Amino acid sequence: MTTLNEILKSINKTKNDIWDELDDESDYKPFIINKTYSYFPDTIKLANELNIRNNIPPKFQYKFLFYILPKKYRFERWKKKKSDKKIEMIMQYYNYSYVRAKEIQDFVDMEHIKKRLETGGFSK
């Protein structure tokens, strides 16, 4: 099984075409690859175009990126959601999803929720 890092390395750094070496075409995940390229100013438009044209077979998406992108080191950590204590408390109290808790956060009595969720004991 070919990993995501190996695929990205072949497109960016080594410029060795590994498509024929892939065990399975499903090893290439277009959404993940395009998300990775959305973090860089020189590749964001290409990633967007490939997302728009998601009916293009993975092989051609790989070949397109392989031949059009110049050899360059690209690395960026993926952005993660910051945890919001208020949202987490609303989710726990009402048993809501993140989206629903975010929608109602301005309308709830947080002092009441804090008191109800308080379990006692020592905190660190």
Image (cartoon, rainbow, N blue to C red):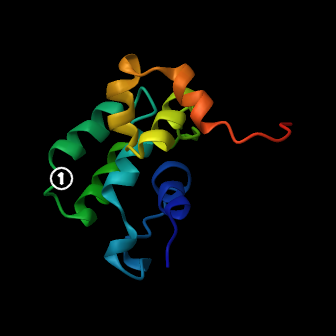
Residue 37 % position (x, y): 41, 41
Q: Would you say residue 70 is visible in this rendering? A: no
Say whether residue 34 is left or right of residue 60: right
84, 27: nearer the viewer = 84
Residue 31 % position (x, y): 32, 53
Say whether residue 86 is left or right of residue 56: right
102, 70: nearer the viewer = 102
Residue 53 against residue 20 in the figure, above or below: above
Secondary structure beneath label 1: loop
Q: Residue at x 38, y 17 (%)?
A: 106
Residue 85 against residue 27 in the figure, above or below: above
Q: Residue at x 45, y 33 (%)?
A: 39
Q: Residue at x 16, y 42 (%)?
A: 52
Q: Residue at x 37, y 44 (%)?
A: 97
Disc 1 residue crowd, few under 14, some 14–19, many 20+, Cα 10 Å: few
88, 2: nearer the viewer = 88
Residue 90 % position (x, y): 47, 34
Say whether residue 57 is left or right of residue 82: left
- Amino acid carrying mark 1 in the image: Asn
Residue marked by disc 1: 54
Quadrant location, the C terminus:
top right
Say whether residue 49 is left or right of residue 110: left
